[in-house]
Image (tube, grey):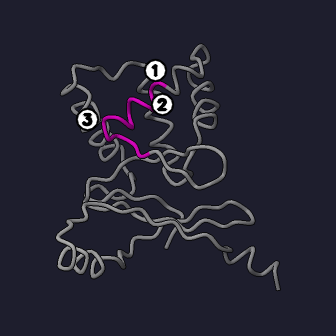
Amino acid sequence: MSEAAYMPGVGILKTEEERKYRISVIEDRLKEKDLKLTPQRRVVLDVLLDNQSKHLSAEEVFEFVRKKFPDIGLATVYRTLQLFDDFGVIKKLDFNDGCYRYELSEDQRHQHHHLICIKCGKIYEFDDDLLEDLEKRIYKNNSFKVIDHAVKFFGYCKDCLKDLT
C-alpha cells in the first residue's frame, strides 16, 4: 500500500521519457476518435500526470489548470474530464465525499483499489487483488465472467487511528 500512484507497464512516471510515452498513448487514443490533444486538453492532462496520487476533483484540476492556462473556464475542464473518461484515459471515482475524483486509467484488467480514511479524507491505493478466487467461483457457479470490479474500504488511516486511542 502506498500513496504514490503507479502505472502498470509504465510505473510511476519518473522520467520525461515515460511521461512522453504516456502522452503519446493518450494522443493516439484521441486520434482514433478524430480528436486532437488541444492546448486546453494538454494542460488538463499535465495536471493529472503531475498529481497522480492525489485523486483530484474537477474543481481541484481547474485550480491547477488556471495557474498554467489562466483563460480556461471550468466548463472546459469538466468537458475535458468527461471526454477523457469516455475514452478511457481517466477513471471517474466516487469516494462518497460529495464529488467525483479522477485518476489516470491503467492498462490492465483490474484497477487498483482504494483505502479511504473517514476522518481526514486521505486516499491510499493498494494493488492486492483478493477477489480472483471469488471471480472464478462466480464464473463456475453462475456462468458469469467478471471483467472488472471496484473495491473501496472505508476506515481510519494510521495517523487518525493514533488520535482515536
User: Which element is circle 3 on?
Assistant: helix
Where residue 130 appears, x then y in whole percent? Answer: 36, 79
> Mark 1–mark 2 contact, CB under 8 Å?
yes
- Quick check: 58 left or right of 125? right
> Mark 3–mark 1 contact, CB under 8 Å?
no
Total number of numbered labels?
3
In the image, what residue occupies the spot 65% across and 61% down? Answer: 122
Where residue 136 appears, x then y in whole percent? Answer: 22, 78
Q: Nearer the viewer, residue 118 or 47?
A: 118
Position of residue 27 relative to residue 70, above or below, is below
Q: Amino acid at mark 2?
A: Val
Q: Amino acid at mark 3?
A: Ser
Tell me the quarter of the picture where residue 80 sits. top left
The answer to if 89 sits in the magenta stretch is: yes
Where residue 78 appears, x then y in whole percent? Answer: 52, 27
Query: Which region shows up in magenta?
Result: 79-91
Position of residue 95 relative to residue 42, above or below, is below
Give the prevailing secondary structure in the magenta stretch: helix
For the residue carrying disc 1, how many other residues have a C-alpha within 10 Å: few (<14), some (14-19), or many (20+)?
Answer: some
Q: Which residue in the structure is indicated by mark 3?
A: 24
Where residue 103 appears, x then y in whole percent? Answer: 46, 48
The label on residue 40 is 1
Q: Tell me the quarter of the image containing the C terminus.
A: bottom right
Q: CA distance from mark 2 to mark 3?
A: 15 Å
Q: CA distance from mark 1 to mark 2?
A: 6 Å
The label on residue 44 is 2
For the residue carrying disc 3, how many other residues have a C-alpha within 10 Å: few (<14), some (14-19), or many (20+)?
Answer: few
